[in-house]
Image (cartoon, helix red, strand yellow):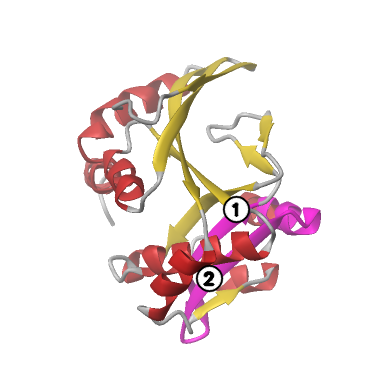
Amino acid sequence: MQSLRTKKVNKIKILYKQYGLGVFNRLIKSALIRFGLIHETLLVFEKQLNYEDLDKRLKKIDVSNVKKITLKDFDTFSGLTQSRKELYKKRLDEGSYLVFGIFNNNKLVYYSWVSLKNIGLPFGFQNKIKLDGNQALLEDSFCDADFRGQGYHSKVNIVRQRAILDSGRTEAKVLVVKDNIPAIKTQLKSDFILTSKIVLKKIFKKEYIRTQKIKTNAKN
């Protein structure tokens, strides 16, 4: 069995892979959460969608293994907690979410969501931000550790954007934690534009949410 020290080192390695140099801020903020204190900044990226652009992208890749999935499909995803499955059931029951996945040998190995109504805030915040009628949010993408690095996210991302257009909406939004440097670079390479920040503060159970607009030519 792994020692406690080895587990901590492995956790830091995983966080570094996800956040890059931003991992040091993540470790500090994770420690503060234990005391009921949260101070996070979410960067909001937006992209105007059109069929011509997405159809060109879809012709260049094989998306035949990307499927719209149901709650039952999550039974085959490794490590899914009961609380998360209950959240997903609630989303699907609401009818304002779409979820797409990729299977390997009848096992779900990657999935990614689209919210058509609200921006659900992370870090346990109960409040939600309502989306405009022409907007949808790309959120909650998870990949089995054994299948990472195979381009699944880029592939499903295009399918999700096409689904947003098919739903009658023309703008995709993405939230990225400010410390997640690799994810920020990915959004910029995907033609998303940084448009605003959402500052989240929580002192025990008291929530504070502030949105700040950013000029499109401003640097983060």
| Residue at the spot 28% in from the left edge and 41% down from the top edge | 19
Q: Amino acid at mark 2?
A: Gly
Name the secondary structure under disc 1.
Answer: loop
Position of residue 194 measured from the top left corner of the image (x, y, whole percent): 40, 35
**Residue extending farthest front:** 52
Residue nearer the viewer, 59 or 144: 59
**Dot 2 crowding, Cα within 10 Å, few <14, some 14–19, many 20+:** many
Distance between mark 2 and mark 1 Cα atoms: 22 Å
State yes or no: residue 98 in magenta. yes
**Dot 1 crowding, Cα within 10 Å, few <14, some 14–19, many 20+:** some
Residue nearer the viewer, 189 or 112: 189
Q: Which residue is mark 2?
A: 101
State yes or no: residue 212 in magenta. no
Residues marked 2 and 1 touching at CB (< 8 Å): no
| Residue at the spot 71% in from the left edge and 53% down from the top edge | 91
Mark before the other along the chain sequence, 2 or 1: 2
Q: Which residue is mark 1?
A: 170
One can see residue 34 in this view:
no
Identify the image quadrant of the N terminus.
Answer: bottom left
| Residue at the spot 69% in from the left edge and 61% down from the top edge | 167
Position of residue 95 measured from the top left corner of the image (x, y, whole percent): 78, 57
Q: Is residue 17 above or below residue 210?
A: below
Region rendered in magenta: 87-115
Mark 2 or mark 1: which is in front?
A: 1
Identify the image quadrant of the C terminus.
Answer: top left
Position of residue 112 measured from the top left corner of the image (x, y, whole percent): 52, 60
Q: Amino acid at mark 1?
A: Thr
* 56 horizontally vs 67: left or right: left
